[in-house]
Amino acid sequence: MAGLEPRGLALGETEYTTMDAPTLRVTIWNEYLHEKTNEAVKLIYPNGIHGALADALTSQLGADVTVRTATLEQPEHGLTEAVLAETDVLTWWGHKGHQRVSDEVVDRVQASVLEGMGLIALHSSHVSKIFTRLMGTSGGLKWRDVGEREIIWCVKPGHPITDGLGDHFELAHAEMYGEMFDVPQPDELVFISWFEGGEVFRSGCCWRRGKGTVFYFRPGHETYPIFYDANVQRVIANAVRYVAAPTGCPSITSNCQNTEPLRPIASA
Ligand code: ZN
């Protein structure tokens, strides 16, 4: 996030100018299962989906980010207290291994979000433990995988996540996700998808949780090279900047106390 630095001018006047933004620390989490067992997926993502996303963010954001990756089969799924303490934004891609994610790690990630870590949940992470925990709903939706065309419409032009995009972009082949998407009303609805078969879907949504921001972004099925798409990469890079943790705010998760009144209460 950009900081402000006073640039003194005439007596009594102060103008603020933007300092160099500190480097954002991004951890890319991937269950990394399909890529090791499915030849078709391995061909598309030879270094794993996490590898493709790491390359994308590095090329999109350059020196503005430091990127590390973590996967399901690492100890503590690669998401130790130390890693999360050094993470401003966590991206999450899971599909068939959702139930293998330990509740202890989910608790830890949830606590980090409430304290301000940004979370970007991608595609099939709509039913991951961490996403449904943060939403409080099932995350359920309709789906169909026949490789149909998808048009992703930007319905919040000017939103930072849409920076550099036009009013829509297309994916030639995608898995369909359709409404009803069982999530709480988004705080910000950024994208809506239309599919060749007729369904629509809220493809880009933001929610505030504690001090943190969660962004769900729909594209990304493992059998399509969607994470190499320039527009998809742009959205994820924009989202990294957008959900990055604010700094300097007091904790709000400890705001639970039996407190003395500020003023006398007549009935007490
Ligand atoms: Zn999928």
Image: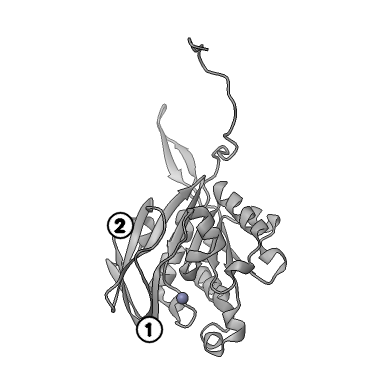
Between 108 and 169, the one lying in front of the other is 108
Between 182 and 194, the one lying in front of the other is 182
Q: Name the colouring of the figure.
A: one colour
Ligand 1 within 8 Å of disc 1? The answer is no
The crowd level at tag 2 (other Cα within 10 Å; few <14, some 14-19, many 20+) is some
Nearest to the eye among marks 2 and 1: give it. Answer: 1
Does 170 sit left or right of 85 as displayed?
left
Which mark is drawn over residue 77?
none
Ligand 1 within 8 Å of disc 2? The answer is no
Element type at marker 2?
loop
Q: Farthest residue in the top direction?
A: 266
- Mark with earlier residue (2, 1): 1
Residue in the image at 34% along x and 57% along y = 189
Between 19 and 106, the one lying in front of the other is 106
Label 2 to label 1: alpha-carbon separation? 27 Å
Is any atom of residue 77 visible in this view?
yes
Give the x, y percent position of residue 102: 66, 62
User: How many numbered circles does the render carry?
Assistant: 2
Give the x, y percent position of residue 185: 37, 52
Q: Quadrant of residue 9?
A: top left
Does 68 sit left or right of 151 as displayed?
right
Q: Amino acid at mark 2?
A: Lys
Q: Is residue 13 above or below residue 263?
A: below
Does 16 sit left or right of 75 as displayed?
left
Which mark is drawn over residue 147?
1
The crowd level at tag 1 (other Cα within 10 Å; few <14, some 14-19, many 20+) is some
Give the x, y percent position of residue 113: 55, 51
Between 16 and 102, the one lying in front of the other is 102
Instruction: Please give the residue where the numbered disc 2 appears in the rendered image.
Output: 156
